[in-house]
Image (spheres, rainbow, N blue to C red):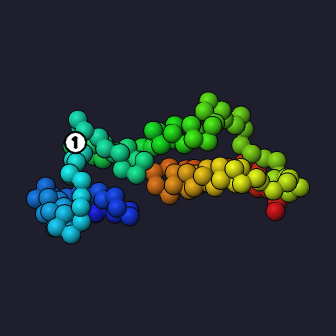
Amino acid sequence: MLILLFVDDCLADGETNDVEWFFDILATRFDCKDTEYITPETPQDYLGMNVLTDHDYFYMFMSSYIVNACRIMNIEGKGPKTPMTDPIDHDSPPLTPPEKKQFMTGLGMLGWLCQTVRCDVSYRRGPQIPP
């Protein structure tokens, strides 16, 4: 059996009897929601990752998370025409508290994307920029 646990979100894969046994034991100690099963008819959202199956394979994608992240960051429909190649401006004034909050939110969302399903987000392309 495989168990993925992130704080209070749990995903288990294995034989049905083993998974039910695990969640029954867990429910004796914690107040748990009802178990939901991933089937071809019932995909699930696990921590922003859409998980679905066709009985042979599991698939994970994050399109809903990305759309929501773009909405939160107010960048819907926007995108770079080319990769960032210009050096970062070191003379800009410090961020205001709301700007800092938005920056940290965006950084956290990008971190989650590159550490879960979208590892390509962390791939650096383009010319190397000296520090």
Say which residue appears at 65% left-offset and 49% top-offset.
Answer: 102
Res. 79 visible in picture: yes
Residue 13 drawn at (x, y percent) = 24, 57
Q: Of 68 and 89, which appears nearest the observer?
A: 68
Relative to residue 23, is residue 61 depicted above or below? above
Q: Quadrant of the N terminus?
A: bottom left
Say which residue appears at 64% left-offset and 36% top-offset.
Answer: 75
Farthest-out residue, left: 17
Q: Does residue 124 appear left or right of residue 117 in this picture?
A: right
Residue 82 drawn at (x, y percent) = 72, 38
Residue hosting label 1:
39
Say which residue appears at 19% left-offset and 63% top-offset.
Answer: 27
Residue 100 drawn at (x, y percent) = 70, 54
Amino acid, disc 1: Thr
Q: Quadrant of the C terminus?
A: bottom right
Relative to residue 49, is residue 115 depicted above or below? below
Farthest-out residue, bottom: 29
Q: Of 3 and 86, which appears nearest the observer?
A: 3
Q: Of 40 and 70, which appears nearest the observer?
A: 70
